[in-house]
Image (spheres, rainbow, N blue to C red):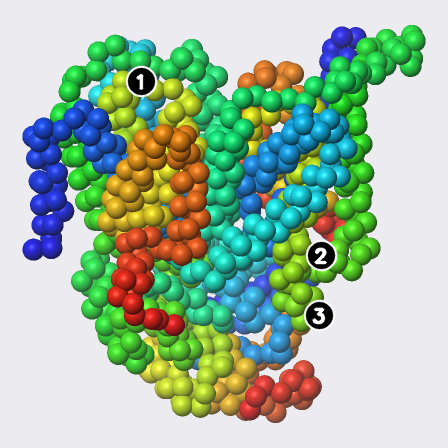
């Protein structure tokens, strides 16, 4: 059975710099795959390639058995792959509700349908109370959850979370982790970039480690935390644990 | 032979004009690079400088080329004033439309044009200098030359002064502390801030310099052309086409951009028709945006990276 | 009740010609309404979608010349220009969109400016088709008094209002605003930004072109310097929306009223007569710095100013 997402030998160059080099891995349906690595390892670039913002310089990306590398981001989203951004990009002068409605239209035939779906998702992510606030007035924790809510509104099968937990205080962190777990329970596959080691180790089923654009290791959290090379790659990097 | 003659003459004229165009574009490129502002009042500022030069000539018998010395500092002050009192306040404003700053400069340009019309009337002005028709002919130097080429005194002097100013600017940016601070701010504002550069002052100074540069261009322009209040719009267009050809924010690019645009216009005027030169300007603009959005600068950069 | 407000206003306005107003005042009314159309059209692209066009004169002029050329070269009534302008401007918008919509930020703005100017110079030079700077003159306008023109433009404005309102409240409207706020985020959320930007550009252009075609029939004379004018058409359109309030439905109406009246008022002051552009320029600067969302958008700010409440 083919994996939900297949990254095959993807390289991405910027001028002379190889941000990604011959990276291959797969994401199985229903799992949470963690993508980790020191700063500058190429994790967000990987997301940008999968999501369609960059075409791979070499290699291919397949989703649900079909090639998506080379498609535009909106086409990829229509096929069921959504992402959040590391630096959150709310639609600032729209309300929280409208932010989600705009995304919900993808799978809704009418405004009424979009509103209904948005209500459900806002309650799911704990944003219902703030639904009429302008999104630029939201605190960071809410904005991060809004990123997730918007992506969820497109009813993805695969959700790419880019540092959805960065910069959160402990209680916000707990809320977000809870939401991620509930997303998995809904049957949505997740690939997540995170620097919080504890978070990644706790929620990931499998982990892929990138460093300097190359895949260093792949395995279960237990395997990865015991991997000497991974530890070496992180030596000197303290990630706020 | 006449075909070759026409070709070379067109080329020479374009090249000499290119010096002036480069000067016009340099001011805008500098401002764009440091402040990320597109100043659509650039041409109108040049028009203001031209009026300064005109009145210095008419009332004070000051040769336009010499008036550069007086006009440039005055324009610098004007630029600083505009920056401090009009553009800076805009930074604190939050509005729905993203391009407020461009619109602001449009407003400034409108006011300048209209004030000029009110105070100086729409009459065409010129500075008829004594050497207005003086020119050098190739046949003067090379008796048996098969071609007849000429360079007018005015064109050449304008070009040389423009080149001198450009060189002085280059030294300023490369060698002086202020110049380096300006380049730092253009490259990475936050990093410059962290390095102790007074970014605010650099922005003000840069706008002043950009205005001063276009003021100099105005002085160099007026001996050869007619002056009237609506002239500003044309020069604004030239300025931003030059900067786009050169690559947004690149001063080196602006120099190439000025030469390229002027030569292109010269050829359009000669071979297609005078009226179409303006269209040619925009055609090249759109073409560059589509095919080489980074401008000449991106070509230079990729050569440097050895790609 | 609120739903019928626009219709009620339109009904009231429809009664205006029945009052004993001078021809000059009727002219002012017509101008205000025509500019409201242009303002609403520009607002759709600039205020809602965030694509600030400095070249809307291109659409206006194309509409005007669609009517003018049909009249001059084919001998048809200039009113055929209205449906024809829709076709002409649609095709033009699609081509223009293909070229400029891929550009971001200031590149886009400048290229719209360029296109407006290119069309102006082209109209001036292609004199076999457009009569160049001589312009096109209607020998006998449809009506000598202004009533019927007024009702035509009022109807057009009502239609424009509902088209814009319908788009803005629908899925399209959400997409437009999403594109304005963050184009990359919008793309990632499944919004075909190219398609939607094209729709915004085309609808905005067609509505403006219709106003241009009307202008030809109403004024009875057009020439390139007037209908493709950068400050007189393109910048004025921007001003109307900025003064009134971008991304609001009623902003352009308020803006149009103010700008047209202001222009006429300044023109009538003896010394200041020719200075209306300066006044506009100063107004533009003040609005941008102090009331960036226009009178309608920043209404709250204005109210606070008058009720003396302080806010941080």
Q: Which residue is mark 3?
A: B195
From the viewer's perspective, tell me whether residue B24 is left or right of residue C289: right
Q: Which residue is mark 2?
A: B183
Quadrant where the N terminus of chain C is found in the figure: bottom left
Label 1 with label 3: CB-CB less than 8 Å: no
Which sits in the foreground, B18 or C209? Answer: B18
Is residue B172 visible in the rendered image? The answer is yes
Rendered location of residue C97, percent (x, y):
42, 39
Badge 1 and badge 3 both on one subunit: no
**Residue name at image x 41 percent, y 28 percent:** C228
Rendered location of residue A74, percent (x, y):
40, 57
Badge 1 and badge 2 both on one subunit: no
**Residue name at image x 48 percent, y 34 percent:** B114
Which sits in the foreground, C210 or B196? Answer: B196
Which sits in the foreground, A223 or B20? Answer: B20
Find the distance from the CA under tag 1 to the CA under tag 3: 62 Å
Find the distance from the CA under tag 1 to the CA under tag 2: 52 Å
Q: Which mark is residue C221?
A: 1
Q: What element does badge 2 sit on?
A: helix
Q: What element does badge 3 sit on?
A: loop
Rendered location of residue C41, percent (x, y):
30, 41
Picture quadrant where residue B72 is located: top right
Q: Is residue C86 above or below residue A99?
A: above
Rendered location of residue A91, percent (x, y):
38, 63
Q: Is residue A115 above or below residue B1?
A: below
């Amino acid at each position: 059975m083919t994996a939900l997402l297949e990254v095959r030998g993807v390289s991405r160059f910027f001028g002379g710099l190889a941000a990604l080099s011959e990276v291959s891995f797969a994401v199985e349906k229903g799992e949470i795959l963690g993508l980790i690595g020191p700063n500058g390892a190429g994790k967000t670039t990987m997301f940008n390639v999968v999501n369609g913002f960059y075409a791979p310089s070499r290699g291919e990306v397949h989703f649900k058995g079909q090639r998506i590398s080379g498609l535009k981001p909106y086409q990829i989203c229509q096929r069921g792959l959504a992402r959040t951004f590391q630096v959150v990009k709310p639609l600032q002068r729209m309300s929280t509700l409208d932010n989600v409605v705009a995304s919900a239209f993808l799978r809704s035939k009418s405004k009424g349908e979009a509103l209904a779906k948005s209500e459900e998702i806002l309650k799911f992510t704990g944003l219902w109370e703030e639904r009429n606030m302008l999104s630029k007035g939201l605190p960071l924790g809410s904005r991060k959850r809004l990123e997730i809510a918007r992506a969820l509104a497109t009813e993805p099968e695969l959700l790419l979370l880019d540092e959805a937990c960065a910069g959160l205080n402990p209680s916000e962190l707990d809320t977000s982790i809870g939401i991620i777990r509930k997303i998995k329970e809904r049957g949505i596959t997740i690939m997540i970039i995170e620097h919080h080691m504890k978070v990644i180790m706790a929620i990931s089923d499998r982990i892929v480690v990138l460093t300097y654009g190359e895949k260093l290791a792949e395995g279960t959290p237990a395997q990865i935390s015991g991997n000497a090379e991974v530890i070496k790659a992180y030596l000197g990097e303290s990630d706020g644990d | 032979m006449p075909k070759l003659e026409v070709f070379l003459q067109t080329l020479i004229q374009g090249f000499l004009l290119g010096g002036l165009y480069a000067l016009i574009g340099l001011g805008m490129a500098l401002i764009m690079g440091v402040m990320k502002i597109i100043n659509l009042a650039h041409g109108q500022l040049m028009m203001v400088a031209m009026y300064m030069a005109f009145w210095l000539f008419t009332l004070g018998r000051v040769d336009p080329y010499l008036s550069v010395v007086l006009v440039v500092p005055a324009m610098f002050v004007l630029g600083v004033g505009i920056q401090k009192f009009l553009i800076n306040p805009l930074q604190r404003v939050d509005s729905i439309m993203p391009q407020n700053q461009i619109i602001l400069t449009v407003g400034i340009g409108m006011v300048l044009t209209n004030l000029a019309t009110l105070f100086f009337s729409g009459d065409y002005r010129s500075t008829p200098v004594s050497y207005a028709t003086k020119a050098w002919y190739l046949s003067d130097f090379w008796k048996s030359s098969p071609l007849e080429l000429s360079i007018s005194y005015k064109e050449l002097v304008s070009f040389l002064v423009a080149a001198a100013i450009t060189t002085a600017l280059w030294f300023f940016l490369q060698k002086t502390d202020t110049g380096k601070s300006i380049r730092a701010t253009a490259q990475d504002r936050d990093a410059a801030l962290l390095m102790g550069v007074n970014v605010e002052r650099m922005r003000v100074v840069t706008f002043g310099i950009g205005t001063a540069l276009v003021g100099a261009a105005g002085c160099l322009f007026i001996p050869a052309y007619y002056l009237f209040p609506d002239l500003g719009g044309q020069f604004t267009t030239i300025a931003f086409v030059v900067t786009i050809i050169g690559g947004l924010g690149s001063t080196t690019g602006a120099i190439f951009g000025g030469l390229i645009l002027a030569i292109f216009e010269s050829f359009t005027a000669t071979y297609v028709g005078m009226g179409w030169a303006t269209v040619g300007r925009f055609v090249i603009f759109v073409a560059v945006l589509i095919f080489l959005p980074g401008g000449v600068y991106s070509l230079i950069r990729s050569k440097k990276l050895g790609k | 009740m609120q739903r019928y407000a626009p219709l009620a206003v339109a009904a009231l306005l429809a009664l205006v010609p029945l009052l004993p107003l001078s021809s000059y005042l009727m002219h002012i009314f017509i101008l205000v309404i025509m500019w409201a159309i242009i303002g609403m059209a520009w607002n759709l692209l600039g205020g809602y979608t965030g694509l600030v066009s400095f070249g809307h004169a291109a659409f206006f002029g194309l509409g005007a010349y669609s009517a003018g050329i049909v009249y001059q070269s084919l001998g048809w009534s200039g009113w055929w220009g209205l449906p024809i302008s829709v076709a002409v401007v649609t095709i033009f918008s699609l081509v223009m969109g293909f070229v400029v919509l891929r550009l971001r930020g200031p590149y886009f703005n400048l290229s719209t400016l360029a296109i407006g100017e290119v069309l102006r110079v082209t109209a001036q030079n292609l004199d076999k088709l457009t009569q160049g700077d001589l312009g096109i003159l209607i020998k006998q306008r449809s009506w000598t008094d202004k009533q019927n023109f007024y009702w035509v433009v009022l109807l057009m404005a009502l239609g424009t209002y509902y088209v814009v309102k319908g788009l803005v409240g629908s899925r399209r409207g959400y997409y437009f605003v999403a594109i304005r706020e963050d184009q990359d985020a919008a793309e990632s959320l499944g919004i075909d930004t190219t398609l939607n930007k094209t729709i915004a550009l085309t609808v905005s252009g067609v509505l403006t072109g219709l106003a241009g075609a009307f202008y030809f029939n109403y004024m009875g004379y057009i020439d390139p310097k007037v209908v493709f004018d950068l400050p007189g058409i393109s910048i004025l359109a921007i001003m109307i929306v900025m003064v009134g309030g971008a991304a609001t439905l009623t902003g352009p109406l308020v803006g149009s009223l103010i700008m047209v009246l202001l222009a006429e008022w300044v023109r009538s002051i003896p010394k200041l007569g020719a200075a209306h552009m300066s006044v506009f320029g100063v107004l533009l600067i003040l609005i941008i710095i102090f009331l960036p969302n226009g009178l309608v958008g920043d209404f709250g700010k204005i109210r606070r100013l008058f009720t003396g409440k302080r806010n941080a």
